[in-house]
Amino acid sequence: MAEKEIIDNIEGEYKYGFTSDIETETIGKGLSEEVIRIISEKKGEPEWMLERRLAAFRHWQGMKLPQWAHLDIPEIDFQDIIYYAAPKATKKLGSMDEVDPELKRTFDKLGIPLEEQMALAGVAVDAVMDSVSVKTTFRETLAEKGIIFCSISEAIKEYPELIKKYLGRVVPHTDNFYAALNAAVFSDGSFCYIPKGVRCPMELSTYFRINAEGTGQFERTLLVADEGSYVSYLEGCTAPRRDENQLHAAVVEIIVEKDAEVKYSTVQNWYPGDENGKGGIYNFVTKRGLCHENARLSWTQVETGSAITWKYPSCVLLGDNSVGEFYSVAMTNNYQQADTGTKMIHIGRNTRSRIVSKGISAGRSQNAYRGLVRVAKGADNARNYSQCDSLLIGDKCGAHTFPEIDSNNPTAVLEHEATTSKISEEQLFYCNQRGLSTEDAVGLIVNGYAREVLAKLPMEFAVEAQKLLAISLEGSVG
Amino acid sequence: MLSIKNLCASVDNKQILRGINLEVRAGEVHAIMGPNGSGKSTLASVLAGNEKFTVTDGSVEFLEQNLLELPIEDRARMGLFLGFQYPVEIPGVTMANFMKMAVNEQRKFRGEEPLSAGEFLRMMREKSAIVELDSKLTNRAVNEGFSGGEKKKNEIFQMAMLEPKLSVLDETDSGLDIDALRIVATGVTRLHNEQNATVVITHYQRLLDYIVPDYVHVLYKGRIIYTGDKTLALKLEKEGYDWLINDYKE
């Protein structure tokens, strides 16, 4: 099988590129204190929240764009973006009847039914379109256990004490350029609180959809797992097919209290741009979790979308015996660029972390793994195992790894393994000889390669992710 | 079933096959022997459609179709099976999953419904018994971490699953100990019937103790230079190829 044909076959068809005809309320382009006041007012926020936003904005104005990533980022004009766009709601959504039918149709089309009786068994959804949460399902069911699951806008009004206590605690607005921007203009996202000792009976998920043109999406997710609790959380993202680039700068903060466990899974499928690299989402995301004593945080991500991805879901292992995990499949095709990985910061004693990163590059894409494993002075007996694999399809793409290890404690045990491989013509010939088409063979081989990570996803989503990997690769092999 | 006429093929501009003629009918077993580098594996690869090789002349008819025009996967779906000399590993893809796709692709090609999970599992159990393949192996990744013997048994297991019309087994006996050889060869024999045909490529007579060939061909420098019955293999075992090659030179 010729290399050229291999590449020709991974021509992906983006299934979620449609635009919904929904009346949208937007504000003018540009960013200023005035714009932030408008956003805060539209959300009916208390004064303290506005003050926080303004503090973040003032800090952001003095910051420079980070340049260290292995990414070629075209200049972004932050004054040419609309910072607030909301589907025009009839009124505040309380029951299903009040959701705009077109919105419902949109989410149905995305496979996210907003009616509870139609939902995937055992999955509660917070659906976010552009700047606002349009519906959160199963709120009452969850409330019976004391679990709070709602949009962050509501949480700010209804649970101000929790928000004041936790928001910005893991990712302060001073953290980085995009985190500061997000803290200033974030419009919606999900809030979740699992009380002490409660095991969340269903998967919680947030589905992010960008629909409006010329807008940026800045969502904020805050997840608090109180002592001894457990929750599995999943987020998915899609956007219409457009020639323009759209900015998505999100912040996810997770607090995992003593003895608690959080699994956070992402299937990121923002519009990646066309085969010539036109359009697509710029995805700049800060995700970090703080683990207290005996706590466990596991990140799983399947990244197939976005023109540019800049994302490092991290764990701060503060408490003794806490555990951080990062499982990642990052696939790039055509002209996509990804610089993604994780940071494992070992502070407590006997802390353990595990990193499994599987990069897949095809077309003319560039795919980088960037990781930091830091062991603080007091982190006796810290352990890390890292495995970074790269799979190359064709000879015009790039795979890069930037693993950094910073150990300040002699008792630490750190292991790092890395491999780079290609789909071989022998493998394809073998599959063809058994009657598989080349496209199916590539999908099969790539899924096999990513299996260890896919196995960490909740069942329903693992199947979706498998299909997504195969679709995203269509056309790159032959 | 298979009719090869004046088949010539090259790799990297080097001529390997220089005019092969071979007729294989249903129910027959053919053995192809010959010294190293004579083109035996190339013949198998060209029949299967490996694009590393370029067909420069000749024709091949398989089940009344022009084989050389068909893509690799269609040849396979029609019932052409190649037992690989060096089966490749496909990490993370279970044998069960791999075979399910292969079997169902073939069924789709024939216009049949895919097998249900139950039917498929039953079939897997039944067929893995033919080559005494540990059924646990079917839950492992394709050929990954398999011993040499297991890999070869696994090839015959796949042959059993796919029930090909024509099987071309490329040095399926190489690297096998006596027991594994017996199991593999017995498996092949059990799968043989009046409706299918088998071409075994081998260096050794010992395989032919189990798989009794109707014809033994000697391939040398890209041509079949001699054809005999099963006694030819015995003679070759004893006397080597020199007498034939010398004849050929003259």
Image (cartoon, coloured by chain):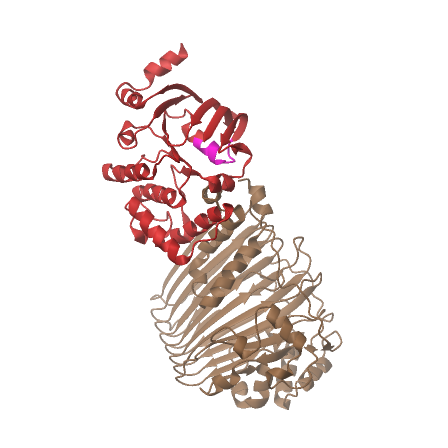
* Chain A display color: brown
Q: Quadrant of the C terminus of chain B?
A: top left
Q: Residue A415 vs residue B236: left or right? A: right
Front residue of B159 and B112: B112
**Vertical arrangement, residue A443 with respect to residue A385, above or below:** above
Q: Quadrant of the N terminus of chain B?
A: top left
Q: Residue furthest top?
A: B250
Residue B155: % across, % down: 36, 42
Q: Residue furthest front?
A: B194
Q: Residue A197 vs residue B73: left or right? A: left
Front residue of A89 and A457: A89
Give the magenta part as a residue range.
B44-53
User: In the rendered structure, does residue A47 fall within the stretch colored magenta?
Assistant: no
To which quarter of the image does residue A244 belong? bottom right
Residue A274: % across, % down: 66, 56
Q: Residue A367 vs residue B177: left or right? A: right
Q: Residue at x 40, y 46 (%)?
A: B89
- Specify whether residue B186 is in view: yes
- Specify whether residue A209 is in view: no
Q: Residue furthest right?
A: A28
**Vertical arrangement, residue A109 with respect to residue B118, above or below:** below
* Chain B display color: red
